[in-house]
Amino acid sequence: MSFPTAPPKNPFRAPGPDADDGERFRTYEEAEQYLAEFTDYERMVKGTHYPEDLFDLRRIEELLKRVGDPHRKLRGLHIAGTKGKGSTAIFSDALLRAHGLVSGLYTSPHLVNKEERIQVQGEPLRKEEFLAWMNVLRPSLLTLKESALAPTFFDIMTTTCFLHFQARGVEAAVLEVGLGGRLDSTNVFKPDVCLITRLGMDHMEKLGNTLALIAAEKAGIIKKNIPVVSLPQEPEAEAVLRDRCAQMEAPLYRLGEDIRVEEDRNAGARAFRVETPGGIYPGLELTVLGRHQRLNAAAAIAGVEIFLGRTGRKPLEPDRVRQALRHVRIPGRIDVLGTSPFLVVDGAHNPLSIETLIRAVREELRFKDLHVVFACSKDKQIREMLALLAPQARRWTLAWFDFPRIEDPETVRRWLEEIDPAAACAVTRSPKAALEDAFARSGPEDCILCCGSFYLVGEIFKRFDASKKVVQA
């Protein structure tokens, strides 16, 4: 498979010098409203594409150039994948901070507030900081807004991230890819190590309808001579990653071969150990649920280990690794918000994630009946997810909320009834009503599982006053 290595020649003349209307955004709300005027592909429905002649990085490159290219001096890790990239990013950030580095974390989407996406030392961007950075960007945005190189919402947030990281003296940036990899706004960053988590079928309308095509887009973050850490992959995806690494002369370290994860029963029932080319880390335990998180944590260990070596810093210390991983929380990933009955929220939104979620919930929690609260974007493999959940669920509540991409729950119910004609299913028109229905029909020994969309998780967090839940490490 061939990989594009350079964007097409830019047919557009760059806009002139930045405009300056002498004004400033006076309030957070004013800046937020202006940001909302830019294209937000996260909110667009299935079938929406970039124009083909601009489906590259020129938008963000032009914006970054106008504010001094703040990304060029940053060092760090770049993480792509279908499943687990957010968790791996959070583990990496915790390890870096535990070893005394000023760490910046950039993830997406957000659950409650967009400022969650940009964190330094575990603290999200403050609203007054967002306002300040929007005023820094304002002249450039005024100039570019009506041009062929108008940035998107994600371009602007990514640029804000780079500006904030530079200003805060970030020593290690951890960047999670937003969508794909090759053409993602974060791919202007040249990292010290790339991490590829589990790959599967998702975002097919933009990335391709085969695993090989999707893997090629994800592998687009791999750069010349930059080491790569990869989780176990299906053979089709594995071949693509190997080819890309060979083409870019990038060393490849694979979990299961170069990096090993094993049980460590001598250290406790839930303990495991990780062996990498650079060290052995015994007695590890995670607070987050799901055995799959061990692989994500191992990838983070290997990635941070490589980063420290490439930047001339002291190696990882096993005791600090143990302490850091034990205290990591990952909001919205098999996140238990209540008991009696269990209330579990998870942003799983593709078949691979749903399959992993089901296995983790069954292994980690003891309950009688499973009640699924489900909502999902129109561009997802909804029927496939329903087919995985149906044998496990005793009852269903299908939710709707005000988000452009969410599929109508009545449509979801028809698909569910085709899969399971006997499904005990209710349709609600708000997350609040969905939770009320689920609690009303569940007993104290049951489990309510909310899944299908990170946006659903965010709506539930708002109602549980979970906006203050930030990762502690």
Image (tube, rainbow, N blue to C red):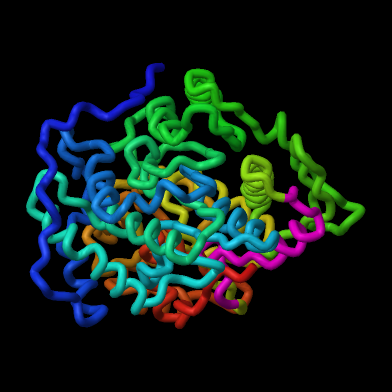
Quadrant occupied by the N terminus = top left
Q: Quadrant of residue 39?
A: bottom left
Asked whether 326 falls inside the magenta stretch, the response is: yes
Q: Position of residue 343 (x, y in %)?
A: 54, 72
Identify whether 185 is placed above or below 10. Answer: below
Residue at 28% from the left image edge and 38% from the top image edge: 206
Q: Nearer the viewer, residue 57 or 330?
A: 57
129 displayed left or right of 138: right
Q: Quadrant of residue 290?
A: bottom right
Residue at 41% from the left image edge and 32% from the top image edge: 220
Residue at 67% from the left image edge and 35% from the top image edge: 255
Residue at 62% from the left image edge and 45% from the top image edge: 311
The answer to whether residue 457 is seen in the rendering is: no
Identify whether 174 is placed above or below 287. Answer: above
The answer to whether residue 48 is seen in the rendering is: yes
Q: Position of residue 230 (x, y in %)?
A: 59, 35
Q: Position of residue 53 (x, y in %)?
A: 16, 33
Q: Nearer the viewer, residue 149 or 182?
A: 149
Number of numbered discs: 0
Asked whether 422 falls inside the magenta stretch, the response is: no
Quadrant occupied by the C terminus = bottom right
* Range shown magenta: 314-338
Q: Nearer the viewer, residue 441 or 109?
A: 109
285 displayed left or right of 414: right
Work out which residue is located at the far right of the displayed protein and give it.
266
278 displayed left or right of 135: right
Q: Position of residue 445 (x, y in %)?
A: 63, 74
